[in-house]
Image (cartoon, rainbow, N blue to C red):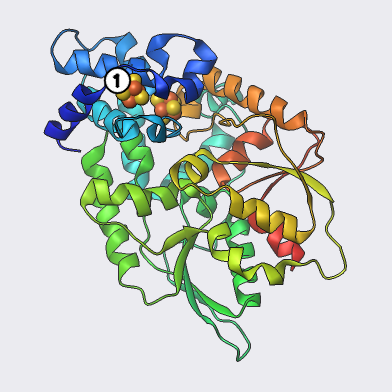
Amino acid sequence: MENESYLHELMKCVRCGSCKAYCPTYEEEITESMGARGRLVLLYELSMGHIKPSYRLIDRIFSCILCGACSGTCPLGIDIKEVIYHGRTLLKKPDVSRRLLRLIVKLYVQSPDLCFRLFKASQFLLPKRLNEKILPFPLELPESPFKSNRHVFKTSNNKKRGRIAVFTGCVINFLYPHLAESLTNVLQQLHYDVIFPAGEVCCGVPLRSLGLEDEAKRLAKRNLNIFKSLNVKAILSLCPTCTLALKVEYPKLIGEGIENIMDISSFFIDKLGYFHPLDNTLRFKEAVYHDPCHLSYGLGVTIEPREILKNIGLNLKEAEREGCCGFGGIFSLTFQELSGALLNKRTNDLKKTDAKTIITSCPGCFLQLSRNTENIPVLHLIEVIKEAI
Ligand code: SF4
Ligand code: SF4
């Protein structure tokens, strides 16, 4: 966003407060400055020179989890999330508390493999207390087969339906590569060849969340060059944050996005016939589905995963209300208390349904929810689909 349109957006706000009603951080803290409207007012006052950047102000702007729940609610069409992204670029200089984090994230996007290896080593070498400070939850880092090389997995039969590319994303690549394997397996069973193109880089969202817009633009351009030139039926991603970034946020960031990228439920919805369990062998019969914010608010996809799950034969329960799991990537590290409070609220709502399994479509929600659900298994949608076919 250019400075001019940023100011224009800020001036459009009539302070009606519609956006505040859906803001999870406001709902938790009940403080005006922890809500969408309050943040916009702060950024407006800052841009007019009425207030100066302070620790508290910076805290308020960076405590937005970037869920996007507010953006569709503004009667004037203000793109609140984009405004907050831009506000963060203006605040990154005075924000000394996240300087080291910015440096680490910049290093990570340059050499993700090396950083993960160093992090893995630090888990053994550093004292437990320090490890817990870096990351508040234990994390296994498996060896991913989807590293920098190009991978092509061909379907073995002659009923080929075309080629599908996968945008893997960092969380899947480094934490849950088995989910990418499941996706490959399902696509092959549906007679598609599957490509993991070489050279994919981070979608750029962690950089943008820290106000590093120029660095994010460089990554966006690299991904765009790789994925737009592919001759494929579709590009699939198991991570709604990546999908939203490449499809919706890149056009605002670099003027062009990747149109044919989609989440798996949007792709599989017209292939429902394949998902009837052969002899009702699913390990569970009922589940509750958790909507990832970037899939529901960002991409408007809520019906498709439910349709797929019902078609598979699951008795699908619904939580009484919507809710963010409190992950938000870097947010879960820098606002641990708030992230934990949102997680508790969400898991309580999900547990109240008495469902024996929780299903979601986002690896971030999967990671976060798994921390607080004790004996209730959390599954990514692709695992359920794989089991069903
Ligand atoms: S993006 Fe989410 S947390 Fe941020 S202001 Fe909007 S509703 Fe609140
Ligand atoms: S809904 Fe729009 S106009 Fe109303 S307070 Fe929020 S940003 Fe301002």
Image coordinates for residue 241, horizontal then vertical, percent:
45, 45
- Left of 167 or right of it: where is 286? right
Residue corresponding to mark 1: 40
| Residue visible at 60% across and 91% down in the picture | 158
Residue 83, x across and y down, in percent: 27, 30
221 w.r.t. 15: above or below? below
Q: Is residue 110 left or right of residue 30?
A: left
Residue 282 visible here: yes
Residue 16 horizontal side relative to residue 362, left or right = left
Q: Is residue 104 left or right of residue 332?
A: left
Which quarter of the rendering shows the N terminus?
top left
Q: Residue 293: x, y in percent?
A: 51, 38
Residue at 42% over, 44% down: 115
61, above or below 156, in the image: above
Q: Nearer the viewer, residue 70 or 222?
A: 70
Task: Respond yes or no on whether mark 1 lies under 8 Å from ligand 2.
Answer: yes
Where's residue 261, x and y in %? Answer: 42, 61
Indicate the quadrant where residue 382 lies: bottom right
Instruction: State the quadrant of the C terminus.
Output: bottom right
Residue 17, located in which quarter of the rendered image? top left
Q: Please tell me how many numbered marks the rendered image carries.
A: 1
